[in-house]
């Protein structure tokens, strides 16, 4: 197994040289110390040496990490620290106490090579309850995701640190990382759901499709479609063995989304089960990571081609000159300006008054779009980790909270008639269309009374409180190994 490319050290003081630059250098020491407690303006940036938290990683978003040394009591600052320091029933090789006796008969800690450079199947599990392949996948993707980490003394929302900061600035590298995460989580998941539906509709598995058809018919006859749906979701959440029974797994690349039958993988061979192409992979998860990389690269190539215009109007697509001239996608802006100039317009910024406003508008909207993509990927990862928890996080509590949210829906769906649903939906549409003054006044009042009510209602602080994203899970595992 390749050695993970991270540098992680939790604990120890943060040097003053790494603090955010003070606005006024004449502030006294007491004012500076009080300013450090304000995490909205003076979050701390980790350095590459002598820092309490150091990540030497590629690209992703800015995250906030709780500083362990700034707590005045002995309680762990976050649930991640508490889980890392807890006594685990199942221990891996990295969780064992290795000690040796020196010449004076005293025990001292011993450093051992646990086999990072060996194949994961040739070494014992490094973390209890987690296969080495999955551990390496988490660390590898963590290194690609983390871009900038800041320390904070505030208690993190949801009890877990390493969450995306609200003031996270936009950069193309961060956007690329978030879109790759979106592909590996949401898009691949929805693709698998679509192929399960195709398998059911194809009747190639007559017993399973017949059972689904019979249950649906009975629910339709007795007007119990919604209660049946919510009850099925309840069973899937509470009883994990029901998932492979109702939805037997199959390699994603082998199932045709059109016919629901078996197809030849797009890669020509079946070398991975969780990728859309079935391409071979050296380690678990690498094939879908390469697909995500090429997915983003393809979007960028199409955007550059559209901006530069590879074929002028009236030119044949198979023009032999295209083979001898440079690819205009490498000169997107110059090509776009040249195309506008050839049509008789003036593309220069000092002549075209629409260029700068449109560019500023596009760049200003990229930051919230990047945050939305990251939030969607985070939410998907939290739901996945709630349904299938990874040690040392609790197994039953997240599933019971999700199931508890489904029980009222079952009761409401039984007592609600179709007329009530139509009336309620039409009333909500009318209120949203005509009630704008009432809605904004109510929101202003709510913001004045409870300034952080939006944060309190986020799923990471309610039904998924304490459920980690993959990055938060990886940090906890690294703290255990530390």
Image (spheres, grey):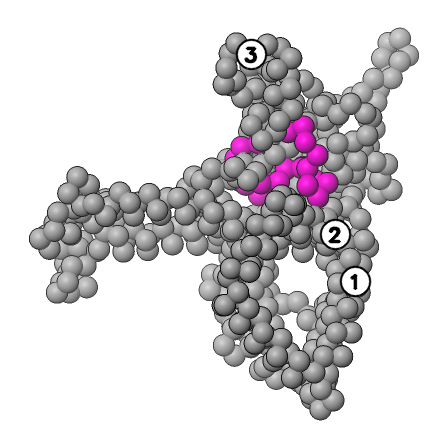
- Look at 71% across and 23% down and name the residue there: 70
Task: Name above or below for residue 107 compared with residue 71.
Answer: above
> What kind of element bears circle 3?
loop
Separation of marks 2 and 3 at Cα, in angstroms: 48 Å
- Look at 19% across and 41% down and name the residue there: 349
| Between 351 and 147, the one nearer to me in the picture | 351
State which quarter of the image contains the N terminus: top right
Q: Position of residue 97 (x, y in %)?
A: 83, 28
**Nearer the camera: disc 3 or disc 1:** 3
Q: Which residues are magenta?
A: 137-164
Separation of marks 2 and 1 at Cα, in angstroms: 17 Å
Ranked by sequence position, the earlier of labels 3 and 1 is 3
Residue 268 belongs to magenta span: no
Label 3 belongs to which residue?
27
Label 1 belongs to which residue?
404
In the visual, does 31 lie left or right of 351?
Answer: right
Whether residue 295 can be seen here: yes
- Look at 78% across and 74% down and name the residue there: 411
Task: Name above or below for residue 54 compared with residue 346.
Answer: above
Label 2 belongs to which residue?
389
Ranked by sequence position, the earlier of labels 2 and 1 is 2
In the visual, does 270 lie left or right of 345?
Answer: right
Task: Name above or below for residue 48 compared with residue 61.
Answer: above
């Amino acid at each position: 197994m390749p050695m993970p490319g991270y540098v992680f050290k939790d604990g120890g003081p943060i040097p003053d040289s790494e603090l955010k630059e003070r606005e006024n250098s004449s502030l006294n020491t007491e004012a500076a110390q009080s300013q450090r407690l304000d995490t909205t303006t003076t979050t701390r940036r980790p350095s590459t040496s002598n820092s309490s938290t150091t990540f030497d990683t590629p690209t992703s978003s800015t995250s906030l990490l709780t500083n362990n040394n700034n707590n005045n009591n002995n309680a762990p600052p976050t649930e991640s620290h508490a889980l890392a320091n807890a006594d685990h029933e199942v221990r891996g090789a990295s969780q064992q106490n290795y000690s040796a006796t020196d010449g004076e008969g005293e025990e001292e800690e011993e450093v051992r090579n646990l086999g990072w450079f060996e194949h994961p199947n040739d070494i014992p599990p490094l973390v209890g309850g987690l296969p080495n392949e999955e551990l390496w996948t988490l660390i590898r993707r963590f290194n690609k995701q983390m871009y900038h980490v800041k320390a904070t003394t505030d208690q993190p929302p949801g009890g877990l640190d390493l969450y995306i900061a609200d003031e996270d600035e936009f950069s193309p590298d961060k956007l690329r990382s978030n879109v790759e995460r979106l592909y590996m989580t949401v898009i691949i998941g929805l693709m698998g759901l679509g192929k399960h539906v195709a398998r059911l509709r194809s009747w190639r598995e007559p017993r399973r499709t017949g059972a689904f058809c019979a249950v649906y018919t009975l629910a339709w006859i007795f007007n119990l479609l919604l209660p049946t749906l919510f009850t099925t979701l309840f069973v899937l959440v509470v009883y994990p063995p029901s998932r492979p029974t109702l939805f037997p797994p199959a390699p994603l690349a082998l199932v045709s989304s059109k016919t629901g039958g078996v197809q030849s993988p797009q890669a020509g061979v079946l070398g991975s089960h969780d990728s859309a192409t079935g391409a071979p992979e050296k380690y678990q998860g690498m094939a879908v990571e390469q697909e995500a990389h090429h997915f983003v690269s393809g979007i960028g190539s199409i955007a550059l081609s559209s901006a530069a215009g590879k074929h002028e109007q009236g030119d044949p697509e198979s023009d032999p000159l295209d083979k001898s001239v440079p690819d205009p996608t490498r000169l997107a802006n110059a090509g776009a300006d040249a195309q506008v100039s050839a049509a008789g317009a003036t593309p220069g910024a000092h002549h075209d008054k629409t260029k700068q406003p449109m560019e500023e508008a596009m760049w200003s909207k990229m930051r919230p779009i990047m945050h939305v993509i990251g939030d969607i990927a985070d939410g998907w990862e939290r739901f996945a980790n709630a349904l299938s928890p990874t040690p040392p996080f609790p197994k039953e509590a997240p599933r019971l909270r999700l199931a508890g949210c489904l029980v009222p829906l079952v009761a409401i769906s039984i007592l609600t008639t179709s007329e009530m649903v139509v009336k309620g939906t039409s009333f909500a549409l009318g209120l949203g269309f005509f009630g704008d003054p009432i809605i904004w006044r109510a929101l202003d009042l709510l913001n004045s009374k409870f300034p952080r009510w939006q944060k309190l209602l986020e799923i990471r602080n309610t039904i998924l409180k304490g459920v980690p994203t993959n990055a938060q899970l990886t940090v906890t595992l690294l703290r255990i190994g530390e």
